[in-house]
Image (tube, rainbow, N blue to C red):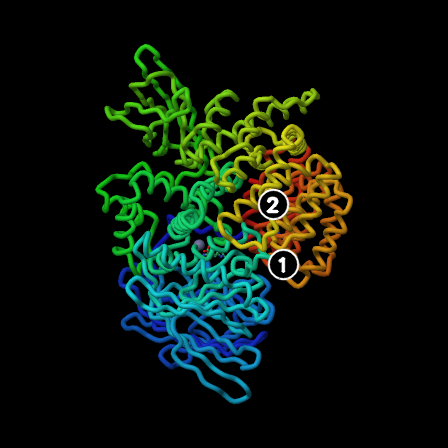
Amino acid sequence: MRDASPQTVYLKDYTPPEYLIDQIELHFELDEQRTRVQARMNVRRNPHSSADSVALKLWGEELQLLSIAIDGRPLQENEFVVGDEALIVHEAPQDRPFEILIENLIDPQANTALEGLYLSSSMLCTQCEAQGFRKITWFLDRPDVMSRFKTTLVADKAKYPVLLSNGNKTGSGELENNRHWVSWEDPFAKPCYLFALVAGQLACVADQFVTMSGRRIDLQIFVEQHNVDKCGHAIQSLKNAMRWDEQTYGLEYDLDLYMIVAVDHFNMGAMENKGLNVFNTKFVLARPDTATDSDYEHIEGVIGHEYFHNWSGNRVTCRDWFQLSLKEGFTVFRDQQFSGDMTSPAVKRIEDVNALRTRQFAEDAGPLAHPVRPEAYIEINNFYTLTVYEKGAEVVRMLHTLLGAAGFRMGCDLYFQRHDGQAVTCEDFVKALEDANGVELGQFRRWYSQAGTPVVTVEQDYDAANGRLQLTLRQSCPPTPNQPVKQPLHIPVKLGLLNADGSPATFEFAGQPHTEVTLDLTAAEQSFNFGNLAGKPVVSLLRGFSAPVTLQMPRSLDELAFLLSHDSDTFNRWEAGQQLATQAIFQLIDSIELGRPLQLEPIVVDAYRRVLADAGGDLSYQALLLALPEESYLSGQMPVIDVEAVHQAREFVKKTLAENLAEQFLELYRQYHRDESGCFDAGAVGRRRLKNACLSYLCKLETPDSHRLAEQQFRAARNMTDQISALAAIVNSRHPDQDDCLDSFYRQWQQEALVIDKWFTLQATSSMPNTFAKVQNLMRHPAFDMKTPNRVRALVGAFSQSNPLHFHAANGEGYRFLADRVIELNALNPQIASRMVSGLAQWRRYDANRQSLMKQELQRIVATDHLSKDVYEIASKSLA
Ligand code: ARG
Ligand code: ZN
């Protein structure tokens, strides 16, 4: 057990900083085990603080103090105290600005938590968000303290020829003993979470970008030498992002240099440090033969995301960490818009909603549910969540919908202009949008403070005599931890009506003719009237998924099939197909649970036959129409999750469709299968997506022909999308040469860490029997490493989060396995350990037997010695 239960931090306790640090000069003598840090800080009392204590508290952890002086006078031992979390100077000067000089030591090599300064392969790098800077030196580590940084790096020239930090390079030189130095200066004041340094033997891929005002910006991507041939897509994505932000938001880059460094060991995706982004290699490196089309898409999205943070995050930052969604929700919304514009808005929207509904909705319905703006945390790193990021982006998207593109842009302009250089709140953002548009968004604000996914139900009443339709919408929201009672939200509901022949209906709403409207649902129950109708229309509701809610609208299979054929809204067309498949699968689940024979409704087969015949020419979209709802999405709708029945029913649908439509699947496969070297253009991506969707159906036939088809594609593939899709089909079937294919893939790619991650994940997510034994063996594979987060996610994360069938084995072996890994990781890397706990958090959703097994493992985790705050918070809240 922990010695003392860790402290909770509350939003309501926020007070402005008592001191400010206007400038900091950092001097690093870099060394793997003994890095010496000198920090010279210009400190003064904050005129806006009303606190009257004279003490100065600087946060710092795992630091070894060498010296401390104020205005050149070394402090005596009785003038300060150093604790586990902070250094307190008992009496700081009150009447004048003063200078503190601190010298300390750190050990990057011992830093397996990958927070602060650490060693990744042979390079030194930093991760400071949220509170990693305090592992570098003692500081006012909070985002509302903004300082100008000057940084000098000194290191061995052979080991660390490249020395980088934020801003512009201001000098460099040689020193004795083969050492050298480089100095950097960032002209923009920033919170310390945006500080970064990198040192290593790095190759640089360079390019340039000319901004809208004609300034020439140097772009540099730093990678290990053997990866220089995998940076083209990242550079192109960066240039696209820079242009897009100028065109869409009028925002221009502000420094003369933009650097990105790719590192193998990284807890998250990437980090927007000012002028010096540090990225997980996964979101930089791509070559057609090593990266899939979806890897290419993710790289584009994350490069965009970190770039967009330069304004939404860096120029305007967060006052405190409760406001995290101010920068993250907004920036995710911006990267979603960008990716949609670069590829297909329709496809991108479906992918985003799919991720939101399968993953964020589960978080919102479980013990870890929290508002987009949380009110309390134990460990802030636990709040980099799907809710803060993805639901936060949905909240910004709703503001965009409510204000319209032009109104939203005016609001953003005002926000950036009003708050440039400041650390602000979600409230400041909403206020700027209100002020710029002269509107009032009072009730809308509840989206920031109220957790949980609202449920919207619909009642239809058609009056044939008068050609009128009345829709009654009701909203409710289930209770979440600490929020038993919910208030109605302001929900924008986009609607269209279809005539009996499938054409869009023109209707009268609020006295005006329309073909589409956005309804403002603000009350718990509200009715809306639509007139001038020639016949009973089919309602297309929540178009584009205009709000992050669960829509409950009883529909017949016929009506869903009709919408799948005719809805002009691309999202709702896809959604009709998903609901059609969902209903069919739930009917089968009932049959399974009642021991009845399984039969798929012919109308479902017919609907998919039509999708295969024609989907309007966008092949990626057609592939999405063919994809059955994921097991986790289906499970989310069951009062008690039956993992086996869900899997069996979904497989049955897939197999039945494959049997009934085999010829069409094969024909489409042949039509689009080419021997492609794999360039990332919309045409080739669409062909591959559709063809590989067909292949995965065909493999369900388990015929020698289908096995041969997959193996041929696997052996001949010259691009990773085709190779891995074929291998996935093989691994998830009873293909006789499965092991041989896996071995040859490993031999081919053993030098490429990111490809080997895929190899681990494929095996960890297989639905075939014996998967758990394979996972256990893979833990002992020489390429497995608990200190590499990508590897842990590829094996432990994939198994526990993406293999419900085997992870939830009724004997509890999956749960025990995961808890053991969490306990091991807790000692190495608390952030990664705590992410892994999520596989157990949803225990209440399962049967009594599984509930008790999962709970038992959570209890075992909570009882572990030296439990980190990270794991303690997630495990204990999961049990509560
Ligand atoms: N701000 C980064 C991003 O753009 C995430 C960094 C979070 N890191 C962490 N350790 N909590 O998404
Ligand atoms: Zn971000």
Mark 1 and ligand 1: say if the CB distance to the nearest ligand atom is below 8 Å. no
Q: Is residue 742 left or right of residue 215?
A: right
Q: Is residue 200 left or right of residue 449?
A: right
The quadrant in which the C terminus is found is top right
Q: Which residue is mark 2?
A: 673
Residue 818 at what x, y percent from top left?
A: 66, 47
Residue that protrudes farthest toward the left in the picture: 438
Question: Which kind of residue does numbered mark 2 sit on?
Answer: His
Q: Residues within 10 Å of mark 1 (few under 14, many from 20)?
A: some
Name the residue at 50% across, 54% down.
381
User: Does residue 865 sit above or below 505 in this rendering?
Assistant: below
Residue that protrudes farthest toward the bottom in the picture: 176
Residue 172 at what x, y percent from top left?
A: 43, 82
User: Does residue 228 sit above or below 287 in this rendering?
Assistant: below
Secondary structure beneath dot 2 equals loop
Q: Which residue is mark 1?
A: 827
Question: Which kind of residue does numbered mark 1 sit on?
Answer: Ala
Name the residue at 43% across, 25% down.
457
User: Does residue 523 sit above or below 759 in this rendering?
Assistant: above
The disc at residue 666 is none
